[in-house]
Image: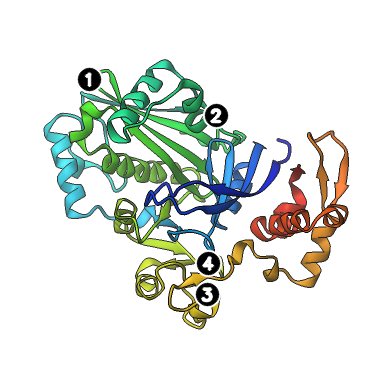
Amino acid sequence: MGETQLRVLGMQRRSRCGYCQRSQQSRCFGMEAARLLCSDYEQMINRGWRRSGSFLYLTDHSTSCCSYYPIRTHALTHQPRKTERRLLRRWHRMELLKDPASDSPGKLTCGKRLRIVLEPAAFSEEKFLVFERYQKSVHDDDATRPGFRNFLCDSPLVYEQIGNRELPHGLGSYHQCYYVDGRLAAVGVIDILPSCISSVYLFYDPEYSALSLGTFSSLREIALVHQLHQTTESIRFYYMGYYIPSCPKMTYKGQWRPAELLDLVSLKWIPIDSCLERIRKHPVFCTFDPYVNSLNMVRDAISDKLDWMPVLSPSTLSENERKKAMDLTFHIGSPRGPEIAGSMLSLVSKELQQAVLQTVASLGLELASRAILLL
């Protein structure tokens, strides 16, 4: 299967926030993945990482205008809310679904007007044309084929066989395509990982916006967790990306119960109801550990600005971890390129020393030691 290959890009500046659209600059720690094992990416998202195509990023909350908390739900125990049940009944009346009430929990059976196809993520002109219409209508933005391919089709994840008949290609990146009356209406981009389905993106034809495809696709992806769990018991969670308290478009994710947020200090998943009050008190960033005062982590209690980002800060590394970070080998240019030790890079500049330590802090020493690291 090979090893994960990550090119360390270091801190990257963003010109504006993609959620609140403020022009205030923020930063993220970035890496480019040439190849990425599914189990390694799952480790990364459990430390706050996300991906956009082959670009992997971890937000630096100390410079961010918004707080980003990874969110997931226990798909196997999720119960649709009243509004979701109403949507399913509407789809049934439109002959898009068979009677949802007759299905077992987590199963949605297509009606005669609906066809759902799960296929490996790949470019097609049909998908691009739907994406182009979506970008123009929803985001008032133009789309290009290379941009679409890089963002939503190309994936560094290596397909990994797990012996599940529902997944002949195994774990990896997929497109879940929704056809209404034979026409492509929407595409859900998902990563299927050892214990979860991670939602990446959804785009749809604006002509079908009345169908509430965003809500239905989430229900369908939760149902897919149920299906896959039947033969692969480790798959049981549904990851929804980031919960962003200051962005109304992103807080809806908290309604998919039972939900949990990732504490970016302890790296533990905490039930969301235990987190919301602390978020209200510390809107820029907080830990959900009741024994830790979030104000100890900010440099200005009035503005509530974070002084350091725990998952990125070298100060969180033990002395032994710092020494092992200096022993890491980095390859210049390619996996077969010249090698240089972290200790040598630290002699070149403080910026490179910081990048070496942040690589270990953000990935964890075990993954950083195992992956092929490139510069």
Structural distance between the alpha carbons of marks 1 and 2: 28 Å
Estimate how packed mark 3 is, as few (under 14), some (14 to 19) or many (20 or more) residues with alpha carbons within 10 Å.
many
Q: Earlier in the sequence, mark 3 or mark 4?
A: 4
Q: Is residue 239 visible?
A: no
Q: Earlier in the sequence, mark 2 or mark 4?
A: 2
On residue 268, the disc is: 4
Q: Is residue 208 left or right of residue 122?
A: left
From the viewer's side, name the closer residue of 72 and 375. Answer: 375
Q: Amino acid at mark 1?
A: Asp
Of badges 3 and 2, the one in the foreground is 3
Of badges 1 and 2, the one in the foreground is 2
Of badges 2 and 4, the one in the foreground is 2
Question: Dividing the picture into quarters, in which one does residue 209 lie?
Answer: top left
Q: How many marks do you count on the picture? A: 4
Q: Is residue 350 visible?
A: yes
Of badges 1 and 3, the one in the foreground is 3
Q: Is residue 58 left or right of residue 319?
A: left
Estimate how packed mark 4 is, as few (under 14), some (14 to 19) or many (20 or more) residues with alpha carbons within 10 Å.
some
Considering every residue shown, the one lying at the far left of the view is 93
Helix, strand or loop under label 1: loop
Of badges 3 and 4, the one in the foreground is 3
The residue at which mark 1 appears reads as: 181
Q: Earlier in the sequence, mark 1 or mark 3?
A: 1
On residue 298, the disc is: 3
Structural distance between the alpha carbons of marks 3 and 2: 39 Å
Structural distance between the alpha carbons of marks 1 and 3: 54 Å
